[in-house]
Image (cartoon, rainbow, N blue to C red):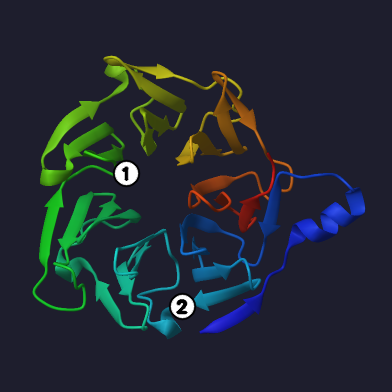
Amino acid sequence: MKHFLLNIFLLSFTALSGWAVDWESHTYSDDVFDVEAVGGAVLCATGGGLLKLDPAGGVFTKYTNVEGLLECPCSGVSVDNQGNWWVAHPSKGVTVRSSQGEVRHFTRYEGIPGDTLCCVAVMGDIVMVGTDDGLWSVDTHGDPFSSPLTFSLYLENRMVRSIFVGDSVIWYGTDAGLYGSYRSAHADTVYHYTTADGLPANSVSSVAEHGELWAGTATGPAVYSDTVWVEKSGGLSSEEVRDLFFHGDTLWAATADGAGFFSDSVWAMRNSGLYSTNVTSLTGESSSPLWCGTIQGGAARYTGS
């Protein structure tokens, strides 16, 4: 594996301007499609491999096909309860990597459908992968490196753009609306919401839940109220929502033109310090800073208030 010192664009910008900025940009890798915070580190799924950022030490560690990834481009990353990294690759399949460096691959030979992998999420021993032709899951029975494993396929003929594991319901954002299933029977969808129920669009990119249920779509976010969805786009500089994320009690949105948080019924954008406002994803542990991934701007850590 390769190690690189961080190139922090913000430091020179701040020194020259003297202005306080909202984000500290770490610009080693241009395109970051997904970010996942775990154990004080940040994993970045990029077009050129998986990067592990150690903020304290100021070092990126890069993982590519040389370190066992199925391919270098990565579209999503998640971590299971054993600390294994699950990496979705856009065209080839999935890599799981243990903390000891053991690697296993899953491809169409294990039943992964479609041509494009969009996202990956973990629920206990079950790992779910959204594709452009349905949702594939594997029950690892606690050990993804041993056989046999149990594979399932559902939501066929749907592009599954996002997966959110809630307290009682798993939500699937698709090109045909928002689906939901109980955690105890994740392959059996019992909810389905579309524009007929108030969603701004049927293309659902993200879901967040913390007291309230939110959905991000191609034309704005919405919150579920009683029996209908209510659009809440006021203050956003772009209605194209790529990700929604609760950092503590605060809801954040990643959009095609920056990131912002929801406060007093409107969105407050916070873009200063971002090397790119084309924001793809958000993450952060409850006691640690918020992070975002961007296109052509690397990853950034929120330092504002």
The reply, left or right, for residue 291 in relation to residue 23 is left
Q: Nearer the viewer, residue 212 or 187?
A: 212
> Residue 165 at what x, y percent from top left?
29, 45
Q: Residue furthest front?
A: 287
Number of other residues with Cα within 10 Å of mark 2, as a class: few under 14, some 14 to 19, many 20 or more: some
Q: Position of residue 61 (x, y in %)?
A: 55, 76
Residue plotted at (52% across, 69% down): 51
Residue 67 can be seen in this image: yes
Q: Which amino acid is tagged 2?
A: Thr
Q: Is residue 124 above or below residue 155?
A: below
At numbered mark 2, what does the secondary structure look like: helix, strand or loop? Answer: loop
Q: Which mark is residue 164?
A: 1
Q: Is residue 60 left or right of residue 160?
A: right
Q: Residues within 10 Å of mark 1 (few under 14, many from 20)?
A: some
Does residue 196 lie above or below 284 as drawn?
above
Q: Earlier in the sequence, mark 2 or mark 1?
A: 2
Q: In this rendered view, identify the residue nearer to me: 262 or 237.
A: 262
Query: Disc 1 marks which amino acid?
Result: Phe
Q: Nearer the viewer, mark 2 or mark 1?
A: 1
Instruction: Tell me if 5 is positioned left or right of 89 in this view.
Output: right
- Residue 210 falls left or right of residue 32: left
300 above or below 217? Answer: below
Which residue is pictured at 76% across the width and 60% down the height?
9
- Helix, strand or loop for disc 1: strand
The relative height of residue 122 versus residue 251 in the rendered view (above or below) is: below
Q: Nearer the viewer, residue 198 or 101?
A: 101
Q: Which residue is mark 2?
A: 64
- Can residue 187 be seen? no
Residue located at (39% from left, 23% from top): 223
Position in image of residue 132 (x %, y %): 28, 49
